[in-house]
Amino acid sequence: MKSYISEFESKDKPKDYYQKLLEELKGKNRELHVFNNLNEDLRDGFPFSVKDNICVRGVESTASSKILKTYKPPFNATVVERLQRQGFAFLGKTNMDEFGFGSFGINCETPARNPFNVDYVAGGSSSGAAVATSILKYHVAVAESTGGSISAPAAFCGVVGFTPTYGVVSRNGLIDYANSLDKIGFMARSAADIRKVLNMSVGRDEKDTTSLDARLRDEPKIQFSVINQLMNGLDDKVRSAFDKLLEKLKSMDYKINYVDLKDIEAAIPAYYIISTAEASTNLARYTGFKYGFKVGDFSKRYNDFFTEARMQFGSEAKRRIILGTFVRGASVKNRYYVKALKVRAMLGEKMRRILRESLIISPTMSITTPKISEVEKLSPVQTYALDMLTIPPNLCGFPHVSFPYEYIDDMPIGAQIVGDHFNDYAPISFVENWEGKFKYRFKYNIGAI
Amino acid sequence: MKIGLEVHVALPTKTKLFCSDSTSETREPNSQICPICVGFPGSRPVLNEEAVRVAKSIAIALNCRVREDISFIRKVYFYPDLPKSFQITQLSESIGSDGFLELEKKRVGIRRIQIEEDPARIIREEGYTLLDFNRSGIPLVEIVTEPDITTEEELREMVFTLRTILHYQGVDVNQEVKTDLNISLAEERVEIKNVTGIKNLIAAAQYEITRQGAIIKKGGVPEKETRSFDAASGTTKTSRKKESEEEYGFIYEPDLTVYDTKNLSENAMRIPTKIAMGLAVKHKANYSTILELIAFDTGALNLINEFEEEFDFKTIIASLEIMKRFGEPANSGVFKEILGLTDQKIDITRDVLKKIKAGDKVEIKKFSEPQIDETIREMLNSDKTIVEKYKKNKNVVNFIVGTISKKYGIQPRDAAARVEGVINKL
Ligand SMILES: [Zn+2]
């Protein structure tokens, strides 16, 4: 099992290792827009990057939003604290879709670009985290997923992206998108490294009431379930690559089972209703006078004052605020918000039944990596529909991993494995096994020793 | 007429509802704040269990159904004092519901008791709106009554009774209580928002009763609307017509899990009105007198309980009244002395109290009544005109009353009565 963390620890580093790393990274950053800022004081320790919506004490943390420019939180996110205590070195804050709103990383001022080809998207919303993992040899990324923000960019950038069971990694210090859906997770170049950082990060945190002290399992399954309804909208190239993957798995003595999961299509509207309802309340606090963007003109009436501040939001943020405010309105709440909560519970129960006996497998994305120019033309509804494969496990809080399994036209594509609640190590174990049969390719190896 | 109230009171906890900042009074603005109560991105609430415990106790004291699995909601609105632009509060899954407050002649329904966070304090100064977040996150309960109050008298009794019950649950009832008042003389409900203090609450109700009464008298109908109370002028004025119903977009607070209240131990359930009634019946004493003594003085009740078996109840009550008159805190050391002296029919003067408190032995000077009357007669004889003058103006004997009172250590009131008695016999 390949672990870059162990390899890094066993190697003698040249004196100017970190300085050289930063220099090279700065150059690449100008091209790929990976980091929103870099830690100039980088020294000793295995480098880890932090998605820009996760707080690092004294470091500008903006969630790639103009409205949070200059916000330097006076505290560390619990996950950052725990990794630092283990001797890991904070490298910098990674680019993302504003507040996590997006699947391609393009909803921000300077979108990150795909390291395999700069005309292509990096995926989102944890765009910078995936690109950083793809270009740095010794590094893990702390990322976050609400509806697929780890799986999607991990697949497009050819890295391993893991999203744990909801609640097992503390959200303290996360700049919230949708609290009941947000999960802090990780990206790495190997599953063994994911296992290591997950192990260091889990555990009850007094500062996050929803955090759990669950004992995570590593309960292997030899059976994979393919949900028929999810296979309908696949791009042809993805379809044939995925079929080949299933054949390969059979040859590795895994069993493939095709199952029906009626109503799984409802996951998308349920997800967008719950996530925007919560997001619209989370974003209500940005009113322009305590932190981040400041209006300055205190002669304005309060309504005009905060309205001016809120012009700083990008268009996707505005869209989700409006949508979320609508779906929780008194006159429609039962039809949307309340119903979506029921759909979430119902789908969770149905998926759990499948996950008791098997792991669910699917492509991570139904399309191959698109060009930036292509996704800019998509309508919001078309974009939302592309999250079909990543949303179900995210909506219901199941642990899942995306891993590279094929390269089409020199671009990686990924598959996603979902496990039962708290069986977080099973998908990771599978990928460790997979890595024995498949060689990941990376275009850059910045920081190689 | 129908009146319903939404009363907000701060809970007696050492720390705030969702963070560990102190709730104590401080002069320095924004000195007891942290990322949580200022709503910094990345921070999240952690529920103060003691606040839930006290709220549960209040719910029980108000005969509510106590919910075992409570949850919180976000109430979203934009106002500078609200750091997250939403208030964490409760609605359908609140700590208490369907209770009542027992008044002398009726019950006032309690619809709901909810736990919520206080917003920051707004200070308006020299054209600026200043914000003090020390108050932000102070735990409150909001007590929502049914519109069962039908007279001003009932309103007063209801407020008194609620306050005394809250006092017995450890709530500081001298704090500035904020109330929303719903009042309708006709069909439509008029809401008066954010009335601060009990005096203003009564004044606002009085004004509104008169205002709506006048409209009805003229053949009109009071409109459904929200009004605000101006304490300076004692009037209410329209703040919002009801066509635009407020929209708060409530959703569950996803950072707090469902909280189990089963194992929270409630306070001792002492309901002062019930206790006063019990004592009144048991000792054939006056209910109101007892209630007045114990309503906002748990110490007084403790003294009653301590000496109830040993002393005559009338003597206990008389002694408590003496303590109250001299502003003496209910403390059993002093009280026991007063009780002993009162039992011997000795008048307690300020001097006597001073001696008791200094630990001096109180000398009991006993004078016979004929002896006192003889002194009065002597003084009256020294000026022959005084009795004539007395018929027109009773104040002419003030000098005599004072001398007698001092010399014999009796109450001026009693001394005056003795003087009058002697004059009448002349
Ligand atoms: Zn605080």
Image (cartoon, coloured by chain):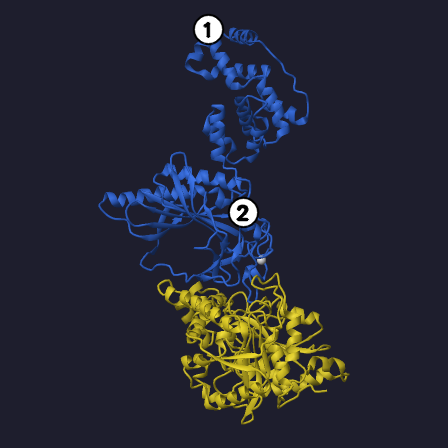
Sequence-wise first label, 1 or 2: 2
Residue B113 picture location, percent across and down: 46, 49
- SS of the residue at dot 1? helix
Residue B54 got which mark?
Answer: 2
> A206 or A44, which lies in front?
A206
Q: Amino acid at mark 1?
A: Lys
Residue B425 got which mark?
Answer: 1
Distance CA(mark 1)–CA(mark 2) = 63 Å
> A401 or B189, which lies in front?
A401
Q: Colour of chain B?
A: blue
Residue B31 picture location, percent across and down: 60, 56
In percent of the image, x 25 and y 45: which residue is there?
B216
> B417 or A62, which lies in front?
A62
Observer-side mark, 1 or 2, equals 2
**1 and 2 marks on the same chain:** yes
Q: Is residue A38 visible?
A: no
Q: Residue furthest left?
A: B219
- SS of the residue at dot 2? helix
Residue B344 picture location, percent across and down: 59, 17
Q: Residue furthest bottom?
A: A409
